[in-house]
Image: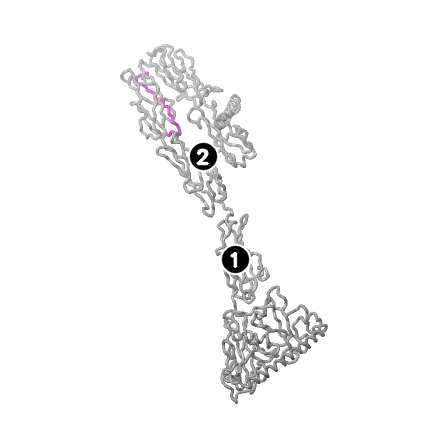
């Protein structure tokens, strides 16, 4: 069996090869912009059909990259395929023309060729040529033909036709009859060019001599090589039934809608027979060569001749059905006559359009220009006429439209700019509607995602940030967090934070704060001091990771909050030579007598710098009191004889912070009978009412005070001249350098005073060094002060003094202990005195007069 099959395939291949040699190369027919080729059926896999790459003018090397392919409908058999390496169209699987094209005529394969980048569409038709691969066959191998012996010479008896699936010259071409003495054969041609044979009586029959005649009928086709089929005809001679049925007409035509239900009457046939009795009774049936498909769809009533619909019609499968019906009487030697019934189907709109997405290019960039091709869509309706005409449209409110490129082919393109941040994805509804009545439609949804482009800069959640940080914060502590949003996605939305370059008080911003580039958390790199810097601002930048990157800036205002970290500093009275401050009080002082004023300052602000005074310790609490707001020390009562002549007081100055800080000053008050002609340790004192009245005593006191003051000033000038001369002589030795504030040899440093104070004036940038003046003190010999006045000392309510230290014996390098360029200057790190809480206005004139007039007279006096 296998050898026979192989031999049959070999013969088929030889016949196909012979056909190709005779027919020449496959034809290419450019018609209406299309290519048309011809190829014989039954070629083996890989057989050459055409060189599409050359015929279409395409670059063969780019076919694979451009996805050159054949577009076919779903579940359709792929008979032909394209080799992407050379552009050759070849046979993918064996083509059986009789299977592909059930109906006769030209058999065409319609191919849709698609190539991308740019998108192009070609239509190719391939005609499948018939080869002689089928032999004619008869419905039966043996026919029984009953012929009446009364048949006249020349009587014709139609024979069953042979069927050959091939077409053209390969179909049934002629018939032959084996030699015999009674019958001859004539071949007739029908209107459709088909052949059938008629047996012609050439010699009178005699049933008594020969009741049965056997002849062999051979059907031959016109193919190369020639094929044939045979059937045995058994002719039985009957007694005379000399009339045969006759149809009204040899051929009938009828039209029938394809949706006609089963049982529908197709046609009523009518045949007549002039005989009587059984010889005149007619029976109808299909001819023997009626195809099975016809027998499945139609039924013939034997007695009535009605042709009824039995199966379901389909116009798209076959629009015409050809029925062969025979009529035969019931008499002896009955002869069957035939007629042809042509059933034309009328198309009904029973097929909805089919939408196929041939090529889809998604996702689409949001900055794609209008007119960008998104997809290629093919639409097919198997109906015909208006029922097969299709219109295609997209749903409303989408930035897309359909453009027709070929018949039933559309391209989906953009109509406007896209924005992923507004609509990240589109569901495009495509509706295909035919022109039938009623119209049928098909909807298909195409999802078009939009790809992101970095077209949005980051945006901070606030236009600016205000941050409040308590001073003395721990370095590295988090102080705030900034946050920005970017409506883009993926890496275009990944943000990194940084601080813009800048300076704060001459220092880079990076030495004050840092920021986490991922989270936006900001950290203080140093401990902030309210007295040095109260507020500053920085620029924070947020930048995305897109290309090119986009960024945004925001201003962060950082305010330093005050903390009670500075204790009050006693300004006056100042202790002399490290001992307690002393003062003389006349025993005749009345209640309310102003002994002096204790003054202090605090570098903090607000409540932290609000000072209150109280008497912490006293020899006799009933004798003195301190005003809590002004610090004025006054007597509560008159002195008694039993009161001690030396009163020890301790005054405490406390600020309003939490927790509160304080400072104390010790006062030694000496009660004397008469006041000497010297100034008080306090800046000013009040005379008793009786002394201040207009009396000779007042005049004497004023004259004495003026004389003493003049003598004291003259002594100061003389001492200053002597000191300056001594300094010039000791410049080369161990004496203090003139530019610096210094103390004369033999003096001892003070352990108290403003040396420990944090309240130091800060000169503005660009000013010259402070001016220093040596002022001899009125205290013990060999102790002096240098008064340093800054350029803006005229605007200051306070003067800050610094005691000078004597040179040390172990300092051998005079340059180290006295550099000419070292002046008493204020460090930039020093804390500024708070001007929010100054001494009361009643104390300020006394403080200024004390600074200007009396500092040289009493170096150890208090400042009012």
Q: Is residue 211 left or right of residue 8?
A: left
Segment colored magenta: 314-333
Is residue 205 depicted above or below 9 in this figure?
above
Q: Which mark, residue 800?
A: none
Circle 2 or circle 1, nearest the eye: 1
Q: Tell which of 494 and 273 is nearer to you.
A: 494
Is residue 5 depicted above or below 530 in this figure?
above
Between the residue at mark 2 and the residue at mark 1, the CA separation in whole angstroms equals: 56 Å
Q: Is residue 332 magenta?
A: yes
Residue 350, quarter of picture: top left
Q: Which residue is label 1 attached to?
A: 555
Q: Secondary structure at mark 2?
A: strand
Q: Position of residue 543 (x, y in %)?
A: 53, 52
Mark nearer the N terminus (2 vs 1): 2
Q: Which mark, residue 404?
A: 2
Circle 2/circle 1 CB separation < 8 Å:
no
Task: Single out the residue that lies furthest toward the bottom.
Answer: 641
Q: Tell which of 493 and 306 is nearer to you.
A: 493
Does residue 5 show up? Answer: no
Q: Position of residue 659 (x, y in %)?
A: 50, 72
Residue 196, quarter of picture: top left
Is residue 387 depicted above or below 23 in this figure?
below
Q: Is residue 145 magenta?
A: no
Q: Quadrant of the C terminus?
A: bottom right
Q: Residues within 10 Å of mark 1 (few under 14, many from 20)?
A: some
Residue 262, quarter of picture: top left
Does residue 432 show up? Answer: yes
Count of labels in the image: 2
């Amino acid at each position: 069996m296998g050898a026979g099959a192989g031999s049959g395939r070999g013969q088929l291949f030889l016949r196909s090869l012979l056909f190709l040699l005779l027919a020449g190369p496959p034809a290419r027919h450019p018609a209406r912009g299309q290519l048309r080729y011809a190829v014989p059926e039954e070629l083996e896999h890989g057989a050459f059909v055409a060189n599409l790459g050359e015929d279409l003018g395409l670059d063969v090397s780019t076919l694979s990259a451009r996805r050159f392919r054949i577009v076919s409908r779903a579940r359709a058999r792929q008979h032909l395929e394209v080799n992407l390496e050379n552009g050759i169209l070849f046979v993918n699987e064996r083509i059986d023309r009789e299977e592909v094209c059930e109906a006769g005529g030209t058999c065409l394969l319609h191919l849709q060729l698609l190539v991308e980048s740019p998108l192009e569409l070609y239509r190719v038709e391939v005609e499948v040529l018939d080869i002689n691969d089928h032999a004619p066959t008869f419905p039966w191998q043996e026919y029984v033909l009953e012929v009446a012996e009364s048949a006249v010479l020349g009587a014709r008896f139609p024979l069953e036709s042979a069927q050959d699936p091939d077409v053209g010259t390969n179909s049934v071409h002629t018939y032959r009859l084996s030699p015999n003495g009674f019958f001859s054969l004539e071949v007739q041609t029908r209107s459709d060019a088909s052949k059938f044979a008629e047996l012609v009586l050439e010699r009178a029959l005699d049933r008594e001599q020969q009741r049965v005649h056997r002849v062999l009928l051979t059907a031959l086709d016109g193919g190369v090589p020639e094929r044939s089929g045979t059937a045995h005809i058994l002719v039985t001679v009957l007694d005379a039934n000399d009339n045969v049925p006759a149809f009204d007409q040899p051929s009938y035509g009828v039209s029938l809608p394809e949706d006609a239900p089963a049982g529908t009457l197709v046609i009523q046939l009518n045949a007549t027979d002039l005989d009587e009795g059984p010889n005149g009774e007619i029976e109808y049936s299909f001819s023997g060569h009626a195809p099975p498909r016809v027998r499945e769809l139609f039924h013939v009533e034997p007695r009535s001749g009605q042709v009824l619909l039995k199966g379901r019609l389909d116009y798209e499968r076959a629009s015409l059905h050809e029925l062969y019906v025979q009529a035969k009487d019931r008499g002896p030697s009955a002869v069957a006559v035939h007629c042809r019934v042509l059933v034309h189907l009328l198309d009904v709109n029973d097929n909805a359009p089919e939408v196929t997405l041939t090529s889809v290019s998604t996702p689409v960039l949001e900055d794609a220009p209008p007119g960008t091709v998104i997809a290629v869509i093919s639409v097919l309706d198997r109906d015909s006429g208006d029922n097969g005409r299709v219109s295609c449209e997209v749903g409303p409110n989408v930035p897309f439209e359909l453009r027709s490129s070929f018949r039933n082919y559309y391209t989906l393109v953009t109509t406007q700019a896209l924005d992923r941040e507004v609509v990240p994805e589109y569901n495009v509804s495509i509706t295909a509607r035919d022109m039938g009545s009623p119209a049928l439609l098909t909807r298909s949804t195409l999802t078009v995602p939009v790809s992101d482009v970095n077209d949005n800069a980051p945006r901070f959640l606030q236009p600016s940030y205000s941050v409040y940080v308590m001073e003395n914060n721990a370095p590295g502590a988090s102080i705030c967090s900034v946050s920005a949003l970017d409506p883009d996605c993926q890496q275009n939305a990944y943000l990194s934070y940084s601080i813009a370059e800048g300076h704060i008080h001459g220092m880079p911003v990076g030495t004050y704060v840092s920021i986490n580039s991922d989270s936006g958390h900001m950290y203080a790199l140093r401990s902030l001091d309210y007295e040095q810097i109260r507020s500053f601002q920085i620029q924070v930048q947020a930048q995305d990771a897109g290309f090119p990157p986009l960024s945004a800036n925001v201003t962060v205002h950082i305010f330093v909050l005050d903390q009670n970290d500075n204790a009050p500093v006693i300004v006056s009275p100042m202790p002399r030579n490290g001992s307690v401050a002393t003062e003389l009080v006349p025993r005749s002082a009345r209640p309310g007598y102003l002994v002096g004023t204790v003054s202090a300052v605090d570098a903090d602000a607000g409540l932290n710098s609000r000072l209150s005074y109280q008497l912490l310790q006293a020899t006799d609490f009933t004798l003195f009191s301190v005003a809590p707001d002004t610090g004025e020390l006054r007597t509560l009562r008159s002195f008694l004889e039993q009161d001690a002549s030396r009163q020890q007081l301790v005054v405490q100055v406390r600020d309003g912070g939490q927790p509160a800080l304080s400072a104390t000053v010790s006062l030694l008050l000496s009660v004397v009978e008469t006041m000497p002609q010297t100034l008080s340790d306090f800046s000013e004192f009040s005379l008793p009412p009786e002394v201040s009245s207009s009396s000779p005593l007042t005049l004497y006191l004023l004259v004495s005070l003026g004389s003493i003051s003049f003598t004291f000033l003259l002594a100061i000038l003389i001492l200053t001249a002597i000191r300056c001369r001594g300094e010039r002589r000791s410049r080369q030795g161990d004496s203090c350098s003139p530019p610096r504030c210094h103390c004369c040899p033999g003096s001892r440093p003070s352990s108290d005073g403003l040396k420990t104070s944090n309240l130091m004036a800060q000169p503005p940038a660009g000013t010259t060094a402070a001016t220093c003046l040596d002022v001899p003190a009125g205290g013990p010999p060999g102790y002096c002060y240098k008064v340093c006045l800054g350029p803006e000392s005229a605007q200051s309510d306070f003067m800050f003094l610094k005691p000078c230290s004597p040179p040390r014996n172990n300092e051998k390098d005079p340059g180290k202990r006295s550099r000419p360029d070292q002046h008493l200057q204020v460090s930039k790190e020093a804390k500024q005195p708070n001007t929010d809480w100054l001494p009361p206005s009643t104390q300020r004139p006394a403080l200024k007069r004390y600074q200007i007039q009396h500092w040289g007279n009493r170096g150890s006096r208090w400042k009012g």
